């Protein structure tokens, strides 16, 4: 499957998450809810995903959750075969636990550019306690194969990287 444009969109989204985290982390408002900061700071309104967060999520909770949710994305997006479930579930667990409406709005926004994002994941249970940031990092359903002798694709295919982002030989 040629998914290089989807990978590009997800990398751009990762950049937006990093920029939003950086802007939110500036200043002394670490215990302020993110949605309040978005109302007060016009420059944060360009990040359409911020108002989708739980109304009680603070800046420090968002920053910690975003780090946990997106830390493996660069490596995963460079793999020959994407682990689509892992990409979406890390965001679901770390930023939208217990926030079904926010999660549904978030994936609807991402799916405008990446139609498969979040498809097939279990529903978020409304009012469920959110897992602490970092839970996806400790989750045994990791992005990496535990058997180092197995191809990263897991299908016995060559792990040779061809096409974007790896230039063709020649």
Image (cartoon, rainbow, N blue to C red):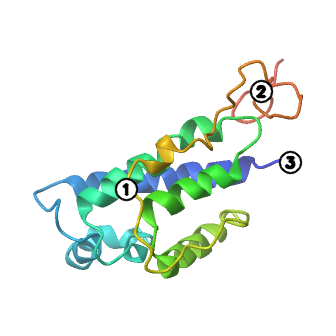
84 up-or-down from 43: above or below: above
Q: Which residue extends farthest right?
A: 156
Quarter of the image where one finds residue 42: bottom left
Quarter of the image where one finds residue 6: bottom right
Check disc 1 and report the residue beneath it. Answer: 132
51 up-or-down from 47: above or below: below
- Mark positioned earlier in the residue sequence (3 or 2): 3
Q: Secondary structure at mark 2?
A: loop
Q: Are marks 1 and 2 in contact (CB under 8 Å)?
A: no
- How packed is label 3: few (under 14 Cα within 10 Å), some, or many (20 or more)? few
The residues bearing labels 1 and 3 have C-alpha atoms spaced at a distance of 35 Å
Q: Looking at the picture, how far across and down is residue 168, in whole percent?
A: 80, 25
The residues bearing labels 3 and 2 have C-alpha atoms spaced at a distance of 14 Å
Q: Secondary structure at mark 3?
A: loop
Check disc 2 and report the residue beneath it. Answer: 161
- Mark positioned earlier in the residue sequence (1 or 2): 1
- Mark positioned earlier in the residue sequence (1 or 3): 3
In-image side of 51 versus 2 (left or right): left
23 up-or-down from 97: above or below: above
Quarter of the image where one finds residue 85: bottom right
Residue 95 vs residue 115, the one in the foreground: 95
Viewer-side label of 1, 3 = 1
Q: Looking at the picture, how far across and down is residue 11, in whole percent?
A: 56, 48
Q: Residue at x 67, y 65 (%)?
A: 121
- How packed is label 1: few (under 14 Cα within 10 Å), some, or many (20 or more)? some
* Residue 43 image label: none
Q: Residue at x 61, y 75 (%)?
A: 108
Check disc 3 and report the residue beneath it. Answer: 1
Q: Looking at the picture, how far across and down is residue 122, in whole percent?
A: 65, 68
């Amino acid at each position: 499957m040629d998914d290089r444009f989807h990978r590009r969109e997800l990398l751009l989204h990762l950049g937006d998450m990093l920029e939003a985290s950086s802007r939110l982390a500036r200043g002394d408002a670490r215990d302020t809810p993110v949605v309040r900061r978005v109302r007060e700071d016009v420059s944060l309104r360009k990040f359409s995903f911020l108002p989708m967060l739980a109304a009680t999520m603070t800046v420090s909770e968002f920053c910690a959750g975003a780090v946990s949710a997106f830390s493996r994305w660069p490596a995963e997006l460079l793999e020959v075969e994407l682990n689509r479930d892992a990409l979406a579930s890390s965001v679901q667990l770390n930023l939208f636990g217990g926030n079904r409406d926010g999660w549904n709005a978030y994936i609807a926004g991402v799916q405008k550019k990446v139609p498969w994002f979040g498809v097939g994941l279990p529903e978020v249970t409304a009012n469920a306690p959110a897992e602490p940031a970092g839970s996806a990092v400790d989750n045994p359903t990791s992005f990496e194969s535990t058997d180092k002798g197995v191809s990263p694709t897991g299908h016995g295919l060559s792990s040779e990287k061809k096409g974007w982002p790896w230039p063709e030989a020649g």
